[in-house]
Amino acid sequence: MEILIKPWNEAKAGAFLVRQEVFIHEQRVPAELELDELDSLATHALAYIDGSCIGTGRLVDLGNGRAQIGRMAVLAPFRNQGVGKQILEKLITLAQSQGANSIVLHSRVLAIPFYEKLGFQAQGSIYDEAGIPHRNMILLLSNLI
């Protein structure tokens, strides 16, 4: 497996296929909510096996030393094999290289333990996002030094 970092114009085809399968088909997120204005501003990490995109995530620079990770998705046959962890680690490293001090994300409540393993901490109350319970999480990069 390899993970490549790409701008949206190069990532769109592979990333959208994964996100469409995971978010729109599996999680029933309305299709009109899946693509947003942050895609073109983000840097995308894509995981490939044998030339096929099997996972994706994005990093958005929010300014003032803050970044946001989002749209993390791995195709079902490749889950629980470390793909998501490798994508997340790549995005964390990328955020650090861009000078971020903290990373925030909107986690599905069911995925909180996954993010906690890499140092993210839950913040605030649970809320609804596209019909799915979510909770904000933060990673202070100064804690990783």
Image (tube, rainbow, N blue to C red):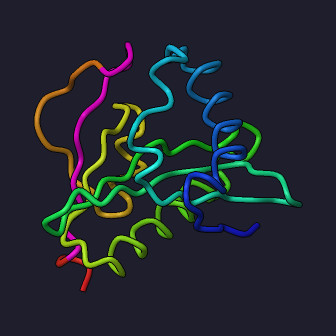
Most extreme residue toward the bottom, as rendered? 145
Task: Locate residue 126 relative to residue 97 in the image: left or right.
Answer: left
What residue is at 67 percent from the left and 38 percent from the top?
Answer: 18
The answer to which quarter of the image holds residue 122 is top left
Residue 80 % position (x, y): 63, 49
Q: Nearer the viewer, residue 128 or 100?
A: 100
Q: Nearer the viewer, residue 119 or 45?
A: 45
The relative height of residue 36 versus residue 128 in the rendered view (above or below) is: below
The relative height of residue 18 versus residue 138 in the rendered view (above or below) is: above
What residue is at 47 percent from the left and 48 percent from the top?
Answer: 40
What residue is at 40 percent from the left and 53 percent from the top?
Answer: 41
The answer to which quarter of the image holds residue 112 is top left
Q: Is residue 50 magenta?
A: no
The relative height of residue 15 versus residue 35 in the rendered view (above or below) is: below
What residue is at 40 percent from the left and 57 percent from the top?
Answer: 59
Residue 31 % position (x, y): 55, 17
Most extreme residue toward the right, as rendered? 50
Stretch in magenta: 129-141
